[in-house]
Image: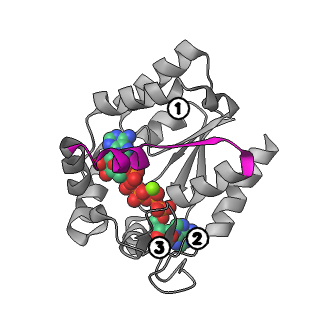
Amino acid sequence: MNYILMGPPGAGKGTQAKKIVEKFGIVHLSTGDMFREAKKSDEDIRKFLVSGRLVPDEIVVNMVKKRLEKDDIKKGFLLDGFPRTVNQAQELDKMLKSENIKIDAVFFIDVHFEEAVKRISGRRVCSCGASYHVNFIPPKVKGKCDVCNGELIQRSDDKENVVKDRLDVYKKQTSPLIDYYKKTGLFVNIDGLKSESEVFKEIKKYIEAK
Ligand code: AP5
Ligand code: MG
Protein backbone atom coordinates (compact mmCIF):
# COMPACT_ATOMS: atom_id res chain seq x y z
CA MET A 1 0.00 0.00 0.00
CA ASN A 2 1.97 2.99 -1.28
CA TYR A 3 0.35 6.32 -2.04
CA ILE A 4 1.13 9.88 -3.09
CA LEU A 5 -0.92 12.78 -1.74
CA MET A 6 -0.89 15.92 -3.90
CA GLY A 7 -2.63 19.27 -3.87
CA PRO A 8 -1.97 23.00 -3.60
CA PRO A 9 -0.54 24.49 -0.40
CA GLY A 10 -3.25 24.43 2.25
CA ALA A 11 -5.40 21.84 0.45
CA GLY A 12 -5.42 19.56 3.49
CA LYS A 13 -2.64 17.10 2.65
CA GLY A 14 -1.17 16.99 6.16
CA THR A 15 -4.63 16.78 7.75
CA GLN A 16 -5.64 13.79 5.61
CA ALA A 17 -2.20 12.16 5.79
CA LYS A 18 -2.47 11.86 9.59
CA LYS A 19 -5.85 10.11 9.27
CA ILE A 20 -4.74 7.79 6.45
CA VAL A 21 -1.54 6.57 8.13
CA GLU A 22 -3.38 6.00 11.40
CA LYS A 23 -6.19 4.05 9.76
CA PHE A 24 -4.03 1.91 7.47
CA GLY A 25 -0.83 1.57 9.56
CA ILE A 26 1.50 2.96 6.91
CA VAL A 27 4.39 5.46 7.18
CA HIS A 28 3.86 9.21 6.65
CA LEU A 29 6.67 10.77 4.60
CA SER A 30 6.20 14.55 4.55
CA THR A 31 9.09 16.44 2.94
CA GLY A 32 7.67 19.68 4.40
CA ASP A 33 7.86 18.22 7.94
CA MET A 34 11.38 16.93 7.28
CA PHE A 35 12.53 20.37 6.10
CA ARG A 36 10.81 22.16 9.01
CA GLU A 37 12.92 19.96 11.30
CA ALA A 38 16.08 20.51 9.19
CA LYS A 39 15.66 24.30 9.11
CA LYS A 40 16.30 24.49 12.87
CA SER A 41 19.98 23.76 12.20
CA ASP A 42 20.39 24.50 8.48
CA GLU A 43 20.33 28.16 7.44
CA ASP A 44 20.12 27.38 3.69
CA ILE A 45 17.02 25.24 4.14
CA ARG A 46 15.48 27.90 6.40
CA LYS A 47 15.88 30.51 3.62
CA PHE A 48 13.97 28.36 1.12
CA LEU A 49 11.15 27.66 3.56
CA VAL A 50 10.59 31.20 4.82
CA SER A 51 10.49 32.54 1.24
CA GLY A 52 8.12 29.83 0.01
CA ARG A 53 10.56 28.68 -2.68
CA LEU A 54 11.22 25.02 -3.36
CA VAL A 55 14.32 23.38 -1.93
CA PRO A 56 16.52 22.32 -4.92
CA ASP A 57 15.55 18.97 -6.44
CA GLU A 58 18.91 17.33 -5.74
CA ILE A 59 18.62 17.90 -1.98
CA VAL A 60 14.99 16.73 -1.83
CA VAL A 61 15.59 13.65 -3.96
CA ASN A 62 18.59 12.54 -1.89
CA MET A 63 16.65 13.03 1.33
CA VAL A 64 13.69 10.95 0.10
CA LYS A 65 16.00 8.29 -1.32
CA LYS A 66 17.65 7.83 2.09
CA ARG A 67 14.26 7.70 3.80
CA LEU A 68 12.95 5.06 1.39
CA GLU A 69 15.94 2.86 2.21
CA LYS A 70 14.68 2.41 5.79
CA ASP A 71 13.00 -0.86 6.66
CA ASP A 72 9.73 0.59 8.00
CA ILE A 73 8.54 1.64 4.54
CA LYS A 74 7.91 -2.05 3.82
CA LYS A 75 4.61 -1.74 5.68
CA GLY A 76 3.57 0.85 3.07
CA PHE A 77 3.99 4.62 2.84
CA LEU A 78 2.23 7.85 2.02
CA LEU A 79 4.25 10.61 0.32
CA ASP A 80 2.96 14.06 1.31
CA GLY A 81 4.46 17.06 -0.55
CA PHE A 82 6.74 14.97 -2.74
CA PRO A 83 7.19 14.91 -5.69
CA ARG A 84 6.66 18.60 -6.41
CA THR A 85 8.33 18.99 -9.82
CA VAL A 86 8.28 16.78 -12.91
CA ASN A 87 12.00 16.16 -12.38
CA GLN A 88 11.34 14.93 -8.81
CA ALA A 89 8.62 12.61 -10.15
CA GLN A 90 11.00 11.16 -12.72
CA GLU A 91 13.65 10.63 -10.04
CA LEU A 92 11.07 8.96 -7.81
CA ASP A 93 10.09 6.64 -10.68
CA LYS A 94 13.75 5.60 -11.02
CA MET A 95 14.09 4.99 -7.26
CA LEU A 96 10.93 2.90 -7.12
CA LYS A 97 11.85 0.90 -10.20
CA SER A 98 15.26 -0.01 -8.80
CA GLU A 99 13.65 -1.20 -5.53
CA ASN A 100 10.73 -2.87 -7.32
CA ILE A 101 8.19 -0.75 -5.42
CA LYS A 102 4.87 0.29 -6.96
CA ILE A 103 2.61 3.27 -6.24
CA ASP A 104 -1.05 2.24 -5.92
CA ALA A 105 -2.67 5.66 -6.34
CA VAL A 106 -1.96 9.39 -6.49
CA PHE A 107 -4.66 11.27 -4.56
CA PHE A 108 -5.08 14.86 -5.66
CA ILE A 109 -6.90 17.02 -3.10
CA ASP A 110 -8.68 19.46 -5.36
CA VAL A 111 -9.31 22.95 -3.92
CA HIS A 112 -9.28 26.33 -5.65
CA PHE A 113 -6.74 28.96 -4.59
CA GLU A 114 -9.31 31.13 -2.78
CA GLU A 115 -10.14 28.23 -0.43
CA ALA A 116 -6.42 27.35 -0.03
CA VAL A 117 -5.71 30.92 1.12
CA LYS A 118 -8.58 30.77 3.65
CA ARG A 119 -7.27 27.49 5.04
CA ILE A 120 -3.66 28.65 5.23
CA SER A 121 -4.44 31.98 6.86
CA GLY A 122 -6.42 30.30 9.65
CA ARG A 123 -4.01 27.43 10.27
CA ARG A 124 -2.42 27.19 13.72
CA VAL A 125 0.07 24.49 14.62
CA CYS A 126 1.60 23.04 17.76
CA SER A 127 5.22 21.91 18.16
CA CYS A 128 3.85 18.40 18.90
CA GLY A 129 2.69 18.18 15.25
CA ALA A 130 -1.03 18.80 15.76
CA SER A 131 -2.67 21.27 13.39
CA TYR A 132 -5.91 23.29 13.62
CA HIS A 133 -7.89 25.96 11.83
CA VAL A 134 -9.25 28.90 13.80
CA ASN A 135 -12.70 28.59 12.15
CA PHE A 136 -12.94 25.22 10.38
CA ILE A 137 -11.14 22.88 12.82
CA PRO A 138 -10.75 24.88 16.04
CA PRO A 139 -9.04 23.61 19.20
CA LYS A 140 -11.25 23.14 22.28
CA VAL A 141 -9.52 26.04 24.05
CA LYS A 142 -8.49 29.01 21.88
CA GLY A 143 -4.72 29.07 21.23
CA LYS A 144 -4.06 25.77 23.07
CA CYS A 145 -3.35 22.33 21.66
CA ASP A 146 -5.98 19.66 22.44
CA VAL A 147 -3.28 16.97 22.53
CA CYS A 148 -0.56 18.49 24.76
CA ASN A 149 -1.92 21.88 25.88
CA GLY A 150 1.02 23.56 24.06
CA GLU A 151 0.75 27.03 22.56
CA LEU A 152 -0.55 27.21 18.99
CA ILE A 153 1.40 29.36 16.53
CA GLN A 154 1.24 30.37 12.87
CA ARG A 155 3.79 28.73 10.51
CA SER A 156 6.32 31.34 9.29
CA ASP A 157 5.45 30.58 5.64
CA ASP A 158 1.73 31.10 6.34
CA LYS A 159 2.16 34.89 6.45
CA GLU A 160 0.18 36.62 3.68
CA ASN A 161 3.16 37.80 1.56
CA VAL A 162 4.72 34.30 1.45
CA VAL A 163 1.43 32.50 0.72
CA LYS A 164 1.09 34.27 -2.64
CA ASP A 165 4.61 33.17 -3.63
CA ARG A 166 3.89 29.57 -2.56
CA LEU A 167 0.79 29.50 -4.74
CA ASP A 168 2.78 30.90 -7.70
CA VAL A 169 5.46 28.26 -7.19
CA TYR A 170 2.75 25.59 -7.07
CA LYS A 171 1.15 26.83 -10.30
CA LYS A 172 4.42 26.98 -12.24
CA GLN A 173 6.39 24.05 -10.85
CA THR A 174 3.97 21.55 -9.27
CA SER A 175 0.71 21.70 -11.23
CA PRO A 176 2.30 20.07 -14.35
CA LEU A 177 2.39 16.90 -12.22
CA ILE A 178 -1.38 16.59 -12.61
CA ASP A 179 -0.96 15.67 -16.28
CA TYR A 180 2.12 13.60 -15.49
CA TYR A 181 0.13 11.35 -13.14
CA LYS A 182 -3.04 11.37 -15.24
CA LYS A 183 -1.00 9.66 -17.96
CA THR A 184 0.00 6.86 -15.55
CA GLY A 185 -3.62 5.97 -14.74
CA LEU A 186 -2.88 6.34 -11.01
CA PHE A 187 -4.47 9.78 -10.60
CA VAL A 188 -7.52 9.99 -8.30
CA ASN A 189 -9.26 13.36 -8.02
CA ILE A 190 -10.67 14.05 -4.54
CA ASP A 191 -13.08 16.92 -3.93
CA GLY A 192 -11.14 18.83 -1.26
CA LEU A 193 -13.87 21.42 -0.69
CA LYS A 194 -15.82 19.01 1.50
CA SER A 195 -15.32 18.77 5.25
CA GLU A 196 -12.22 17.09 6.75
CA SER A 197 -14.20 13.91 7.55
CA GLU A 198 -15.97 13.75 4.18
CA VAL A 199 -12.68 14.09 2.31
CA PHE A 200 -11.25 11.27 4.41
CA LYS A 201 -14.32 9.11 3.75
CA GLU A 202 -13.75 9.48 0.00
CA ILE A 203 -10.06 8.50 0.21
CA LYS A 204 -10.81 5.61 2.59
CA LYS A 205 -13.54 4.30 0.28
CA TYR A 206 -11.10 4.24 -2.62
CA ILE A 207 -8.36 2.46 -0.64
CA GLU A 208 -10.74 -0.14 0.81
CA ALA A 209 -12.23 -0.91 -2.60
CA LYS A 210 -8.83 -1.86 -4.00
P1 AP5 B 1 4.78 21.70 2.86
O1 AP5 B 1 4.84 21.58 4.31
O2 AP5 B 1 4.58 20.48 2.04
O3 AP5 B 1 3.68 22.80 2.50
P2 AP5 B 1 2.53 22.93 1.41
O4 AP5 B 1 2.55 22.01 0.25
O5 AP5 B 1 2.56 24.38 1.08
O6 AP5 B 1 1.27 22.48 2.10
P3 AP5 B 1 0.77 22.83 3.52
O7 AP5 B 1 1.46 22.01 4.54
O8 AP5 B 1 0.81 24.33 3.70
O9 AP5 B 1 -0.77 22.46 3.39
P4 AP5 B 1 -1.51 21.07 3.53
O10 AP5 B 1 -2.04 20.69 2.19
O11 AP5 B 1 -0.68 20.07 4.26
O12 AP5 B 1 -2.76 21.52 4.40
P5 AP5 B 1 -3.14 21.21 5.94
O13 AP5 B 1 -3.58 19.81 6.09
O14 AP5 B 1 -2.10 21.72 6.86
O15 AP5 B 1 6.11 22.41 2.34
C1 AP5 B 1 6.65 23.53 3.00
C2 AP5 B 1 7.90 24.00 2.28
O16 AP5 B 1 8.91 22.95 2.31
C3 AP5 B 1 7.76 24.32 0.78
O17 AP5 B 1 7.28 25.63 0.56
C4 AP5 B 1 9.20 24.13 0.29
O18 AP5 B 1 10.01 25.22 0.61
C5 AP5 B 1 9.66 22.91 1.10
N1 AP5 B 1 9.37 21.62 0.43
C6 AP5 B 1 8.57 20.63 0.87
N2 AP5 B 1 8.53 19.60 0.02
C7 AP5 B 1 9.33 19.95 -1.02
C8 AP5 B 1 9.68 19.31 -2.23
N3 AP5 B 1 9.20 18.11 -2.57
N4 AP5 B 1 10.53 19.96 -3.07
C9 AP5 B 1 11.04 21.17 -2.75
N5 AP5 B 1 10.74 21.84 -1.62
C10 AP5 B 1 9.90 21.23 -0.76
O19 AP5 B 1 -4.46 22.13 6.05
C11 AP5 B 1 -4.39 23.55 5.93
C12 AP5 B 1 -5.40 24.19 6.88
O20 AP5 B 1 -6.73 23.85 6.45
C13 AP5 B 1 -5.30 23.70 8.34
O21 AP5 B 1 -5.59 24.76 9.18
C14 AP5 B 1 -6.41 22.62 8.44
O22 AP5 B 1 -6.91 22.53 9.75
C15 AP5 B 1 -7.45 23.15 7.46
N6 AP5 B 1 -8.20 22.09 6.77
C16 AP5 B 1 -7.72 20.90 6.30
N7 AP5 B 1 -8.70 20.20 5.68
C17 AP5 B 1 -9.82 20.99 5.73
C18 AP5 B 1 -11.17 20.82 5.24
N8 AP5 B 1 -11.53 19.74 4.54
N9 AP5 B 1 -12.03 21.82 5.46
C19 AP5 B 1 -11.67 22.95 6.15
N10 AP5 B 1 -10.42 23.16 6.64
C20 AP5 B 1 -9.50 22.18 6.42
MG1 MG C 1 1.28 19.99 4.99
Horizontally, residue 113 falls left or right of residue 130, namely left
Q: Residues within 10 Å of mark 1 (few under 14, many from 20)?
A: few
The amino acid beneath tag 2 is Val
Q: Residue at x 36, y 74 (%)?
A: 121
Q: Residue furthest right?
A: 209
Q: Residue at x 44, y 82 (%)?
A: 143
Q: Measured along the vertical axis of the image, is residue 18 above or below residue 158?
A: above
Label 3: element kind: loop
Check disc 2 and report the residue beneath it: 147
Q: Position of residue 206 (x, y in %)?
A: 73, 48
Mark nearer the N terminus (1 vs 2): 2
Q: Nearer the viewer, mark 1 or mark 3?
A: 3
Q: Measured along the vertical axis of the image, is residue 166 above or below residue 172?
A: below
Horizontally, residue 41 falls left or right of residue 117, namely left
Q: The C terminus lies in which quarter of the figure?
A: top right
Residue 127 is covered by the magenta coloring = no
Check disc 3 and report the residue beneath it: 150
Q: Position of residue 208 (x, y in %)?
A: 79, 46
For residue 183, the mark is 1
Q: How is the image coloured?
A: one colour
Q: Residue at x 60, y 55 (%)?
A: 18
Q: Residue at x 35, y 37 (%)?
A: 85
Report the front residue among 182 and 38: 38
First to last magenta residue range: 23-42
